[in-house]
Image (cartoon, rainbow, N blue to C red):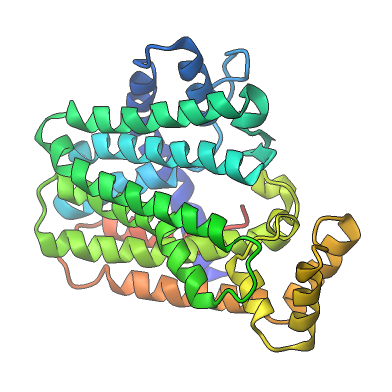
């Protein structure tokens, strides 16, 4: 409760502050997209407008650009060098979300229809491509700090794509191990978080030891982030998450709590494996039963405990590198917020 109280007081103001820094630059970048439809879909994805282009209140937490800003502030005490990287990281993140929703056939994100459902598969994929390309253009056109960041973000994007490919490959497979799931999540989520938490410091010209410590912090935080996301994909409240109820169960995903349940060698885990082998995970009654079996077998408890362990490892990386306050305390607060979140 104390930890939740601490970050509940710090993080909303922090995210609002960094959003105020990043969003104007992000809007300006997307405004340069030459194609009207690509610009519309990108703006819809960011939550700035509806499908007709009418302004709306932005959705999403904007955690990744906040981490990029804090990375620069922690390294050298100023946010300026982290701004282009923050814009690029958020563009890459939303490229991945557009494509993920097409591949997973998700119907809802941030409490409204997903991009492919509104604009069609083809245009959603193309808009994702446009956002990814734009991310690289932003860095290429932003002086030395942008050019320092470019290889770092390119590498993270390659790892992200590889992680998503592994996710698709694991989906529906029998005999998936927890290590395979964690390896997949290291690419799918942790790679971009590790990039976000270190790229601002890199852009600012911080020492390599500082950049690597922040990168390790982000890697462990990214695994924790995805583990919490996996838990919410099983038992999250749709009113809070903005996604369909038990979405990962319905899709037959091999997420961490589901695989922990399947490999638990418990009666509940074995029953769950029989249901999945028979394709019984889509009807409402089967979803309810499968969700109960994941709980009973300890799959959810394992994922929550592992997320806490990863958070501890992440926070350990912030010590002993001469990082500046208050940014280092704010990084720790964001990390705790990520693990404690319910959406």
Q: In this image, 25 relative to 319: left or right? A: right
Q: Does the image show residue 132?
A: yes
Residue 227 image offset from top left, x and y in percent: 54, 66
Residue 144 image offset from top left, x and y in percent: 9, 35
Q: Name the foreground residue: 269 vs 274.
A: 274
Name above or below for residue 77 compared with residue 171: above
Residue at the limit of the structure toward the right, as seen here: 285
Total marks placed: 0
Q: In this image, 221 relative to 236: left or right? A: left
Name above or below for residue 109 compared with residue 266: above
Name above or below for residue 131 compared with residue 231: above
Q: Name the foreground residue: 3 vs 212.
A: 212
Residue 271 image offset from top left, x and y in percent: 81, 79
Residue 157 image offset from top left, x and y in percent: 34, 47
Q: Does the image show residue 336?
A: no
Q: Residue at x 11, y 53 (%)?
A: 206
Q: Residue at x 47, y 66 (%)?
A: 224
Placement of the N terminus among the 4 image quadrants? bottom right
Q: Residue at x 20, y 36 (%)?
A: 80
Q: In this image, 170 relative to 35: left or right? A: right
Q: In this image, 279 relative to 59: left or right? A: right
């Amino acid at each position: 409760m104390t930890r939740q109280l601490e970050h509940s007081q710090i993080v909303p103001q922090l995210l609002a502050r960094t959003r105020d820094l990043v969003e104007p630059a992000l809007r300006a970048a997307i405004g340069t997209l030459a194609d009207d439809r690509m610009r519309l879909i990108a703006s819809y994805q960011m939550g700035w407008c509806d499908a007709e282009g009418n302004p709306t209140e932005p959705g999403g937490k904007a955690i990744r650009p906040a981490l990029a800003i804090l990375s620069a502030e922690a390294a050298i005490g100023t946010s300026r060098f982290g701004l282009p990287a923050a814009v690029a990281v958020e563009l890459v993140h939303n490229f991945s979300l557009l494509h993920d929703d097409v591949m997973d056939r998700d119907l809802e994100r941030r409490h409204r229809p997903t991009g492919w459902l509104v604009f069609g598969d083809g245009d959603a994929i193309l808009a994702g491509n446009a956002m990814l390309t734009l991310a690289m253009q932003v860095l290429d056109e932003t002086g030395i700090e942008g050019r320092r960041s470019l290889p770092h973000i390119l590498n993270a994007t390659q790892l992200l794509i590889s992680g998503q490919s592994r996710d698709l490959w694991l989906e529906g497979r029998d005999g998936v191990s927890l290590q395979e799931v964690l390896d997949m999540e290291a690419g799918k989520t942790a790679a971009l978080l590790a990039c976000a938490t270190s790229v601002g410091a890199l852009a600012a010209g911080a020492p390599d030891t500082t950049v690597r410590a922040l990168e390790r912090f982000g890697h462990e935080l990214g695994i924790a982030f995805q583990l919490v996301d996996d838990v919410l994909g099983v038992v999250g409240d749709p009113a809070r998450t903005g996604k369909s109820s038990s979405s990962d169960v319905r899709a037959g995903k091999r997420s961490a709590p589901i695989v922990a349940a399947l490999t638990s060698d418990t009666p509940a885990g074995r029953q769950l494996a029989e249901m999945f082998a028979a394709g019984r995970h889509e009807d409402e009654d089967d979803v309810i039963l499968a969700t109960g079996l994941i709980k009973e077998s300890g799959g959810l408890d394992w994922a929550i405990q592992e997320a806490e362990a990863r958070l501890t490892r992440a926070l350990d990386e912030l010590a002993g590198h001469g990082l500046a306050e208050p940014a280092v305390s704010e990084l720790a607060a964001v990390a705790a917020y990520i693990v404690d979140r319910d959406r």
